[in-house]
Each structure stands twice: as C-alpha cells, then as structure tokens.
Amino acid sequence: MNLLTIIGESLRALRTNRLRTGLTMLGMIIGVAAVVLLISIGQGAQSKINQSIATMGSNLFIVLPGATSSGGLSFGSGSVKTLTVGDSEAIAELSLVEATAPVISGTAQLNYGANNWSTTITGTTPDYFNVGNWNIESGTFFSESEMRSAVRVAVLGKETARNLFGQEGATGKIIRVTNRPFLVIGVLEAKGQSLSGRDQDDNVFIPLTTSERQITGNQFPGSIRYMMVQAKSAKTMDEAEAEIVDLLRQRHRITGDMENDFTVRNLAAIADVATGTAKLMSLMLGAIASISLLVGGIGIMNIMLVSVTERTREIGIRMAIGANRRAILTQFLAEAVMICILGGVAGIILGISGAWIVSQLADMLIVITLGMVVLAFAFASAIGIFFGFYPARKAALLKPVEALRYE
Amino acid sequence: MLPVRPSTSSQPLIKIEHLCKSYALDNQANGSLNSQVLFDINIEIGQGEFVAIMGHSGSGKSTLMNILGCLDTPSSGRYWFSGQDVAALSGDALAQIRNRNIGFVFQGFNLLKRMTALDNVATPLLYAGMSRASSRKRALEQLRLTGLTDFSLYQPNQLSGGQQQRVAISRALINQPQLILADEPTGNLDSQTSCEIMALFQQLNREQNITIVLVTHEDDIAAYANRLIRFKDGRVIHDESVT
C-alpha cells in the first residue's frame, strides 16, 4: 500500500469514531498549544531582556565609590566621594580601556513655559553618549569645548522632552533648570526600560563642569558620583578590570590588605546573569508544557490499545485477505500519527492565537519563531510514533486464525 | 519471498501428509493439557476439483480449513501448497499466498464494516500493491460479473445476506486465486439464496477451473461438489468422488 492510501485508510478509520478521535486529539491539541504558548512567552521575556541589554552599551564597567572607614568608623558605600574626575581621566589612559565618562547626578526641576517636570540631572562628559550607546534624535550632543567652558546647554531624554514640550520640537528652545536658563541642543532617541526597570528616557544631560559649578554643586570639587568605563574588547574584560583596580589602588594609596574604597561592577556579567535566568525560565516553561504533551501521548496509546482490541476481527479479516504484518503495523501507526499531526496543527494554531491574546491583554512581548512551531510539530509526530508503536505492534503480532475467531 | 507459481498438472494444488493439529490448553490444576483436533490427515486435492468437507461440529473440519488457508499452522505433518512446503514460508510469504492464491468465503461474510462493497472488494488489490484508482476499477468490474453493479457503493449493513456473500465472493475472486476456501458459506442464508450462491461456485469451478473446498453439514449443499470428504473426531472416515 502506498503512503497516500494508508493516510486515506487511517483517516476513514478515525472518522468512524469521531467523538473518541476528537477527545484523544484534544489531549494533543492542549499539549501542543501549551508548548507553543509557554515557549513564546518565555522567548518574549528573553528578547525583552536582550533588547534592554542592547541599549546598555557594550563592554561596560561601572565604577562606584566604595565603603570607607575612618578611625574605626565605617561609612556606607557611596557616602564618601572617593572618585574624582582625575581618576576618570587616568583610567581613560589605560591600555585596555576605550573611554570613560564621569558622572555627577542629582534631581532638578525643569521649566518650559507653563510646563514643569522634575527629573534626574546627569552632569557628564561628551564621551558618556558614546559609552552608554545613546543616539541623538535631533540636534547634537554637547562638545568637548562646551564642556570645558561650562556652557549652559542641555540634552534631553525623550520622555523629559515629551513632558516639557509635548509634540513641539525641543531643540533650540530655552528651558530653565532650577531657575537657570539652558539652551536645549539635542533630544536623545528613546531606549525604554533598563534591566532594573528604570525609565532610561526620563533624564537630562548637561556638561559635567556646568553641573558641578551651577546646578548640583559639589562638597569636594572634582569628586564624582560614579563613572562609566568602556573596555576595548569583550575578551579582555577581566584584564581591564584588574588594570582599573590596580590603578585606583595606586592613586588612592591603598596598599597591602587594605580594602578598596571603590567598587568595579562588570555590567556584561550582570547582563549574562539576566539572560541566563530568562533562558532557564524559557526552558522550564517548555518542560512543564511538554509534560502535558506526554500525558496526551499516553492518552493516544490507551485509545489505540482499546481500538486494537475492538478491531481484532477486522485485523483478522485483513490478514485473511492478504495484509502482512507491516501493513497492519503501518495502518495502526498511521492512525496514531494522524491524530498527533492533526492535533498538532490545531494545537499550533490554538497556541499562536492564545499567545496573541495574551500579548494583547497582558501587554507582554510574545515571540513566535518558525523553529519553535516546527519543533512542536516534530515533537507531536514523534509522540504519535512513540506511543502508537506499541499498540500497532500488538495488532501486527496477532495470529490470523485467532484474530478471525475473536468475537 | 518467492511468489507461488500456478501448479503444473502433474503436481496437486494441495498435498497433506500425516498432518496433526493439537492445541495446548492451559489448565491450572493439571498443568498443560494437549487437546488434539486433527489426527494423521492425508489428502491430495488437484487443480479444478470441487470438494465438500462434511462432519459434525468439533470434527476438525474448520481447523483443517484454517490450515489449508495458511491462517494456522499444523502441529506436525507437512502441507505443500502448489508444491511449496508451507512450513518453510515466512509470515509475509504466507500473507502473500493468502492475498494472491487463496480466496476466503466465510459463514458470517466477514466484510469490513463502514466500507462500501466496492472498497471491500478492492482491499486485497491494495495489499497486492495496486493503486487505489486501478484497484477500484478492477473491483467494479468484478462486482459487475457477480451482478452487484448497483450495490457497489452500499455498505455491508445495507445489503441482504445473499448480497453480502456475493460481495465476499467478489473479494475472494479479485486476485484470480487458484483456490477458494468456503467455510459454511450458506450457513446464514435461506435456501433460495443458498442455491444461487452454490450455483455461482459451480460456475466458477466449471468455467474458470478454480479449485473450491467447501465446508458444510448440509447434504444438499455438499451435493454440488464432485468429491466428498467426511470427518469424524479429527479423522477422515470417508473420501470419494461423486458425480
């Protein structure tokens, strides 16, 4: 018998007991739909994290002032400003470091016309935009010379610009930052949420010098809140970190087993952890859904065993008119596989629709890939073959005379 | 797997020597008991014969039919079909003999349910490797020969007993077998229909030289045959040609 005939025969057999076929198939449909739905949710979460990581900039360290102690009294991390612009400039000279960006930050009230908005103000150097992987939407970043001469210019985050200006263009307008007039020279492209869930677009950037002298002020001139450091290559992150630590210990005169008064954080490592967690979650969701597929498969095996027993006489007749073992095996295997394939297709459609509904209702990012659909389909067929084989073999091994005599 | 060649006139279609058949009965109290059904049977049937096998129920005639039809295997003794030793053949080779060389007609018709008469008749051709379209064409032709053209798309439960048996005979004939084994083919039919069916067998035997082995316990049915074999308690007690 050729394949088309076998498929035709098995479909006919499945049609004769529609309710039973439908219920058996339902196990498969639910299993496949669950796999598609849960994996697409998992992959959605994963790609959301990947997007956040992509906006972060590559090969980044963040260097923070660390805990210090003075005369037996310890101060919390960041309470003493141990890092300086000088540290930042020195680190930028290191062989494995591409660039650095020192940051002073605080909160500021911004006014434009009748609108006012309170946001984070970041005083930094022009390198910051490069290091942090920022793109300009309109206007320009501030320049090295504007930095040096402490000009009152500001670059707005997208969200800040929207709150102050609405639909109006912001570039070229004068805003007031804590009552001092600033010229808006640029608006940044939106980045969305950071890994920690902070809105990265609600921000205003001004030159470090301007900030220090006119806005945030500074207890200790030259000290900074933290700095971003970009390493030259992803491969030499660990070596670069060692260089930074050595240099800072030297500059801060920390010797022997004295504790560092600064902390170097590798953001790539943090990103790796986040990606790893998302992957694990994706895998776990898939595994849980696979269990329902397995249960569906057992249901198919159960029904096929009942069907073989019920149709013993039919098997006997078929053997009497010339069906060999392989023909009987193929017939019953084809029925199990057809249940799985039809159920698999329905399950994929249901799973994709479910994923779409979830993405609409819960405002979640859902990712459906062709590979995933193919995988679910292949898995369903494999389950059909695996669980259909035993009943089919049982049918094929019946003795013709006994099968014929079966009442 | 060697296809069975049509027998030459010199060798019998069926040759059985010292054939015995016993079933192992599992009995908890007495261990395993053997129940012997056939004792030392020796029969030769030539191409073109029309043989009736008679005997009371339990005399072993159905068991012999199953062995002749390659549905069951003897416990001892030998069986040559068309000169081939059946014991030496694989399961697939036996299936092929059942498919190509033997046609079965049963008392209970044994048609496949929820399938049209046409598809029932065409199924052996599918197992022989023919495509669905050409098998249906051949089946339709066969149904025409047995006078069932109008009923080709009916399912077995929509047909009368006589019509069902004609469909079964069409199915048995579809691969042009040398042998038809009919196990009480008229057992479920009224006398009028029985006569029609027997006339059909007689016609097939005379016109197409098909060997027919028929099991029955009715004398008037057995009268259609040219040779009568009587069974009693698993032994042949009578074997004669009648005219």
Image (cartoon, coloured by chain):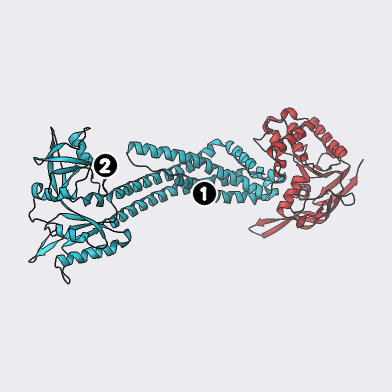
Chain B colour as displayed? red
- Asked whether A41 or B32 is in front, the reply is A41
Chain A colour as displayed? cyan
- Asked whether B87 or A113 is in front, the reply is A113
The reply to whether residue A210 is in sight is yes
From the top left corner, tell me how far across and down residue B231 is, in percent: 82, 48
Q: Chain of mark 1?
A: A
Name the residue carrying label 1.
A383
- Location of the N terminus of chain B (image quadrant): bottom right
Give the residue type that dot 2 points to: Ala
Q: Give the foreground label among 1 and 2.
A: 2
From the top left corner, tell me how far across and down residue B190 is, in percent: 77, 32
Q: Residue furthest front?
A: A145
The reply to whether residue A404 is in sight is no
Q: Residue furthest top?
A: B150
Quarter where residue A249 is shown: bottom left
- Location of the C terminus of chain B (image quadrant): top right
- Disc with the residue nearer the chain's start (1 vs 2): 2
Question: Which type of secondary structure does the marked residue at label 1 adopt?
Answer: helix
Query: Disc 1 and disc 2: Cα gap in Å?
Result: 46 Å
Relative to A333, A157 lies left or right: left
Question: Which type of secondary structure does the marked residue at label 2 adopt?
Answer: loop
- Asked whether A383 or B35 is in front, the reply is A383
Give the residue type that dot 1 points to: Ile
Who's the residue at 72% across and 46% down the image? A322
From the top left corner, tell me how far across and down residue A47 is, in percent: 35, 47
> Does residue B41 sit above or below B104 in this rendering?
below
Q: Residue furthest right?
A: B243
Give the numbered dot on residue A405: none
Give the numbered dot on residue A190: 2
- Asked whether A193 or A132 is in front, the reply is A132
Who's the residue at 63% across and 58% down the image? B28
